[in-house]
Image (tube, rainbow, N blue to C red):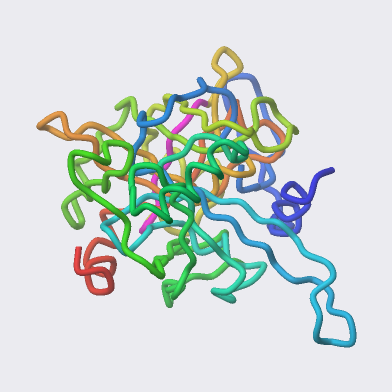
Amino acid sequence: MDTVHRTCVLLIYTSIVLATCAFGAETLSRQKRVIGGTEISKGHSPWLVSLHGKIVTERLFGIIPIRHRHVYCGGSLLNDRYVLTAAHCFDSGRDVDEWEVRLATVDLKVALADRFMDFLGKTLGKKDWRIWEIDVSKIIIHPGYNKNDLWYQDIAIVKLEDPVPSGPRFEHIKRIQLPDGFDFSFPAKGSNCHMAGWGCTAAGGGISRYAMSVQLPILDDTECGYYYNLRTMFGRLCAGFKSSSNSGGICPGDSGGPLVCQNYLGEWTQVGIASFTSKARPEKFPAVFTRVSDYVTWIKSYTEY
C-alpha cells in the first residue's frame, strides 16, 4: 500500500451503512477517492491545480526532519492568489511550509528538460517557460469543518505566496467560475458534469501520474443522503453512478478537485469539491462533493473574488 493510500485509509470514517441499490444490499464505507476516466492534455482544465504536502513525521533529535508523508490533492484556481480545495486534505498537517501548489500541468512528475527551461525562464524573465510551483502562505479551513461528521463542510482556501500569471499568453492557467450563491436549481438532477484530478485508474490502485477526467451525472439530494445516511445535505452534492452497468468515480489524488458543469450560458462553472465516496466500489457508487454554491459568500470574503 503506497503512502497516499495509507493517508486516505487513516481518514476513513469507521462506521458503515447498509444501502439498497439496483443490484442488492451492499455494505458501504467511506473513502476520499475519482476512478477511471480519460487522460487529459495540458490546458484541458486550465483551472486545475495539484497540491503537494510533504508532511514531517519524524525528526532527529526533535529538530531535523528525517521522515515524511507525501499527500496529494487537487484544487481549482479562484484568481491569481487563491486556490479552492477540500479541508480534509490538511488533516495530516496545516504547516504552510510543508505545502506547495503546481499549476498548468497534468503530469505529477517534472522532466529534467522542463526543469532546465524553468531555470532559464526564471533567469531570463520568460514567464511562459516557467514551471509554476508556488509555495503556500496561508491555509484557511472552514470553521464548520468536522472530519468526524463525514467530513461536514469539507472546504478550504489556500493563499499562494506569489501571484500566478494571467492573460492570453497563459492559456493553460485560467480561473474557474463560481456559481451563484445558494442556487439550488443548478446543477439539475441528471446533468452530466466533469471531475478532473490525479485519481487512480482502477479500484484499489495508487494515484495516476497524469490527470484524468471522468463524466459524472448529478444525483438527487434525497437519494444521496439515503446512500450514506447523511444527517443533512446542506453544503453537499452527489454525482456518480449507482449500478453495476456503469463505471467511473473518484480516488486518492482527486480529493479537493473540482466538479464542473456548464451553466445556462454554456460556461464551465465549479459546483463541487471532491470529498468522499464508497471505499469498496467507488466506481459503482456516487461520490459526495462539497456544494460550492452554499459557500460562495464565505469564499468571496477571503479571496476578493
Q: Residue at x 67, y 67 (%)?
A: 92
Q: Quadrant of residue 263?
A: top left
Q: Position of residue 294 (x, y in %)?
A: 28, 59
Is residue 178 left or right of 203 when viewed as pictured? left
Q: Residue at x 27, y 44 (%)?
A: 174
Q: Quadrant of residue 233?
A: bottom left
Is residue 274 left or right of 301 when viewed as pictured? right
Q: Which residues are magenta?
A: 234-241
* Residue 251 on the magenta segment: no
Q: Position of residue 300 (x, y in %)?
A: 22, 67
Is residue 175 left or right of 32 when viewed as pictured? left
In the rendered image, the vertical position of residue 253 relative to residue 10, given as above or below? above
Q: Residue at x 44, y 25 (%)?
A: 41
Residue at the extreme left: 265
In the rendered image, the vertical position of residue 176 relative to residue 148, given as above or below? above
Q: Residue at x 43, y 34 (%)?
A: 195
Q: Position of residue 134 (x, y in %)?
A: 46, 60
Quick one: quadrant of the C terminus?
Answer: bottom left
Is residue 69 left or right of 293 when viewed as pictured? right
Of 302 and 232, the residue lying toward us = 302
Quick one: quadrant of the N terminus?
Answer: top right
Q: How many numbered callouts?
A: 0
